[in-house]
């Protein structure tokens, strides 16, 4: 079984989103962590996703629907070639 190329542990921050509905704070943490991903795993799609999360980090009125959509896109990107394991649970 192949291992994931990189692991991102954002469990604590993700759990706070569920409790507080503070999406912008989680997005700030996620952007910081995504920028630490090794360069050989980064591509334009990840750059676009980081831009989306950065935008949501600055928007106190971001909807849960928009957040979920972009997070789903991140999971799909991460699953390709087992690039990234995103620990949220």
Image (cartoon, rainbow, N blue to C red):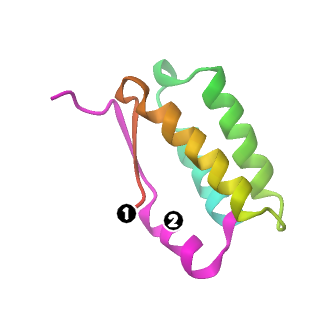
Q: Residue at x 67, y 29 (%)?
A: 47
Residue 14 - label:
2
Name the residue nearer the viewer: 76 or 85: 76
Front-most of residues 63 and 17: 63
Identify the image quadrant of residue 67. bottom right
Q: Reply yes or no: does residue 28 show up in magenta.
A: no
Answer few, some or many: residues within 10 Å of disc 1's Cα (few below 14, many 20 plus, some between 14 and 19). few
Which of the labelled discs sits on residue 89, or is there none?
A: 1
Q: Tag 2: Cα neighbours inside 10 Å, few (<14), some, or many (≥20)?
A: many
The tag on residue 7 is none
Q: Residue at x 21, y 27 (%)?
A: 2
Q: Are marks 1 and 2 in contact (CB under 8 Å)?
A: yes
> Which residue is drawn at the image coordinates 59% and 48% (left, top)?
71
Q: Looking at this view, is 4 or 29 the one in front?
A: 4
Magenta stretch contains residue 15: yes
Is tag 1's residue or tag 2's residue first in the polypeptide sequence?
A: 2
Residue 63 to residue 82: above or below: below
Q: Position of residue 81 (x, y in %)?
A: 37, 23
Range of residues picked out in magenta:
1-23
Taking depth in this image into account, of 28 and 17 the one nearest to the observer is 17
Which image quadrant for residue 48? top right
Q: Is residue 18 left or right of residue 57?
A: left
Instruction: Report x, y in % for residue 3.
Output: 23, 32
Q: Residue furthest bottom?
A: 19
């Amino acid at each position: 079984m192949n291992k994931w190329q990189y692991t991102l542990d954002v469990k604590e921050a993700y759990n706070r989103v569920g409790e507080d509905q503070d999406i912008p704070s989680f997005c700030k943490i996620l952007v910081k962590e995504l920028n630490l991903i090794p360069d050989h795993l980064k591509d334009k799609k990840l750059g676009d996703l980081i831009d989306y999360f950065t935008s949501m980090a600055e928007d106190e009125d971001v909807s849960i629907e928009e957040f979920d959509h972009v997070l789903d896109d991140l999971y799909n990107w991460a699953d390709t070639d087992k690039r990234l394991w995103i620990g949220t649970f």
